[in-house]
C-alpha cells in the first residue's frame, strides 16, 4: 500500500456544532468555517443556520447554530486543541458554563470513536442526544449517522426527543 492510501485510512469524519450568541454572529460562524478548513480539514457538508433560544442559562441572547461534517487526519486531542485555538482567535473567553459566547465549536462525533480525554474531550458529546439544536442540524446533513454508544440514528434520536426548545431554520447562507 502506498503512503497516499495509508493517509486516506487515517482520515476521520468529524461532526462539529458551531454556535454564536454574541457579536456579529453570522460573521463569526463564517470565520469559524474558514479557520476550520484552514486548520482542521475540508468541510464536506454543512447544515443550514438555525436560530435557537439559549439552553442551560436562558437569560441571554439566542444562538445561531449549525453543524459541519469535516474530514480530518488530526488525532482527537490535536483536533480539540485546534478548535480551542480557533475559538480563542475569534475572541472566545471561557468564563461561565452555558454562558453567552462569541463562538462555540463542539465535537459531536469523531468517526465512530468513543473518547474520554479528561478535561479536554468527551465524544460522542455527552448531551447531544438531549438537545434539539444539535440533532436538527445533524439530521439535515446525515440523518442515518449512528450514535456509537446509543446505537440509534440521528433521525431516531430526534424522533424520540422531548426537548421543547424552539429551533428555527434561518435564511442565512454561509
Image: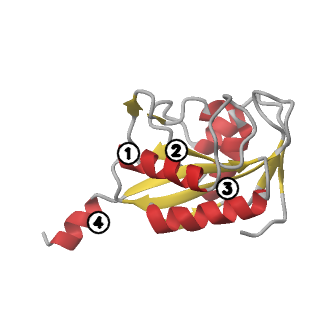
Element carrying mark 2? strand
Circle 1 is placed at which residue position? 76
User: Mark 2 or 4 closer to N-term?
Assistant: 4
Find the distance from the CA under tag 1 to the CA under tag 4: 16 Å
Residue 81's place in the image compared with 165, above or below, is: below
Element carrying mark 1? helix
Find the distance from the CA under tag 1 to the CA under tag 3: 24 Å
Element carrying mark 3? helix
Find the distance from the CA under tag 2 to the CA under tag 1: 9 Å
Find the distance from the CA under tag 3 to the CA under tag 4: 26 Å
Element carrying mark 4? helix
Which disc is residue 107 wearing? 2
Q: Residue 70, position in %: x, y?
A: 49, 60
Find the distance from the CA under tag 3 to the CA under tag 2: 17 Å
Nearer the observer: mark 3 or 4; the answer is 4
Circle 3 is placed at which residue position? 140
Find the distance from the CA under tag 2 to the CA under tag 4: 21 Å
Q: Pointers 2 and 1 in contact (CB under 8 A)?
A: yes
Circle 4 is placed at which residue position? 8
Amino acid at each position: 500500500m502506498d503512503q497516499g492510501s495509508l493517509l486516506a485510512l487515517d482520515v476521520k469524519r468529524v461532526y462539529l456544532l458551531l454556535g454564536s450568541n454574541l457579536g456579529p454572529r453570522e460573521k463569526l460562524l463564517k470565520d469559524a468555517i474558514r479557520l476550520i478548513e484552514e486548520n482542521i480539514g475540508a468541510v464536506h457538508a454543512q447544515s443550514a443556520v438555525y436560530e435557537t433560544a439559549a439552553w442551560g442559562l436562558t437569560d441571554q441572547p439566542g444562538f445561531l447554530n449549525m453543524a459541519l461534517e469535516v474530514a480530518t487526519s488530526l488525532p482527537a486531542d490535536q483536533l480539540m486543541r485546534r478548535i480551542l485555538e480557533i475559538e480563542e482567535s475569534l475572541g472566545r473567553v471561557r468564563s461561565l458554563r452555558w454562558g453567552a459566547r462569541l463562538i462555540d465549536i463542539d465535537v459531536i462525533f469523531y468517526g465512530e470513536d468513543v473518547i474520554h480525554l479528561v478535561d479536554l474531550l468527551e465524544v460522542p458529546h455527552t448531551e447531544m442526544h438531549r438537545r434539539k439544536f444539535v440533532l436538527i442540524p445533524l439530521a439535515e446533513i446525515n440523518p442515518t449517522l449512528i450514535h456509537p454508544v446509543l446505537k440509534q440514528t440521528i433521525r431516531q434520536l430526534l424522533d424520540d426527543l422531548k426537548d421543547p426548545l424552539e429551533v428555527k431554520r434561518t435564511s442565512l447562507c454561509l
